Amino acid sequence: MASQKLFDPMKMFRLAPLITTTASLMYAIGEHMFLSTFLHRNHREQSNVILPSWFKQWFNSGVLVVAGLNTATIASTLSYLYNPGELKAERSTS
């Protein structure tokens, strides 16, 4: 099929766990780099004033991102592992 030469959905299906895991790790690294600046002793007093209210606002959106990425990773991995018919068909055509 000509469209599969340009875009193979099975390749994207196989890459989905890798992509979502990478996105989750990049989000975690970004948050760590951003939040670790508040731990520096020069910013300690300002952090104690600002961070409690900031975390209340940030936490709701942060949890949705992390939960969404982790759910997508788990779902795509399980669907790939529990779909042996597609894997056998793909291996026989390769």
Image (cartoon, rainbow, N blue to C red):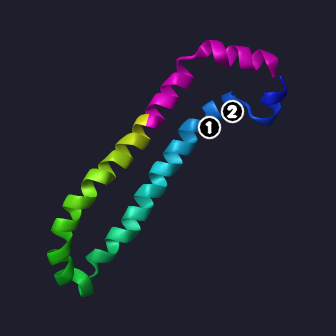
Q: Nearer the viewer, residue 42 or 46?
A: 46
Q: CA distance from mark 1 to mark 2?
A: 6 Å
Residue 75: x, y in percent?
46, 29
Amino acid type indicated by mark 2 = Lys
Circle 1/circle 2 CB separation < 8 Å:
yes
Q: Which mark is residue 29?
A: none
Amino acid type indicated by mark 1 = Leu
Residue 58: x, y in percent?
27, 59
Q: Crowding at label 2, few (<14), some or many (≥20) Cα neighbours within 10 Å? A: few
- In this rendering, the answer to whether 92 lies above or below 24 is above
* Residue at horizontal 33 percent and vertical 76 percent from the top: 37
Residue 5: x, y in percent?
82, 32
In the figure, residue 35 lies in which quadrant? Answer: bottom left
Q: Crowding at label 1, few (<14), some or many (≥20) Cα neighbours within 10 Å? A: few
Magenta stretch: give its range. 72-94
- In this rendering, the answer to whether 61 lies above or below 91 is below
* Residue at horizontal 23 percent and vertical 60 percent from the top: 57
- Local secondary structure at mark 2: helix
Q: Which mark is residue 15?
A: 1
Q: Quadrant of the N terminus?
A: top right
* Residue at horizontal 33 percent and vertical 71 percent from the top: 36
Prevailing SS of the magenta stretch: helix
Please give the residue where the numbered disc 2 appears in the rendered image. 11
In the figure, residue 46 lies in which quadrant? Answer: bottom left
Q: Residue 3 in magenta?
A: no
Q: Residue 91 in magenta?
A: yes
Toward the bottom, the furthest residue is 42
Task: Please indicate whether residue 69 sits to the left or right of residue 51 in the image.
Answer: right
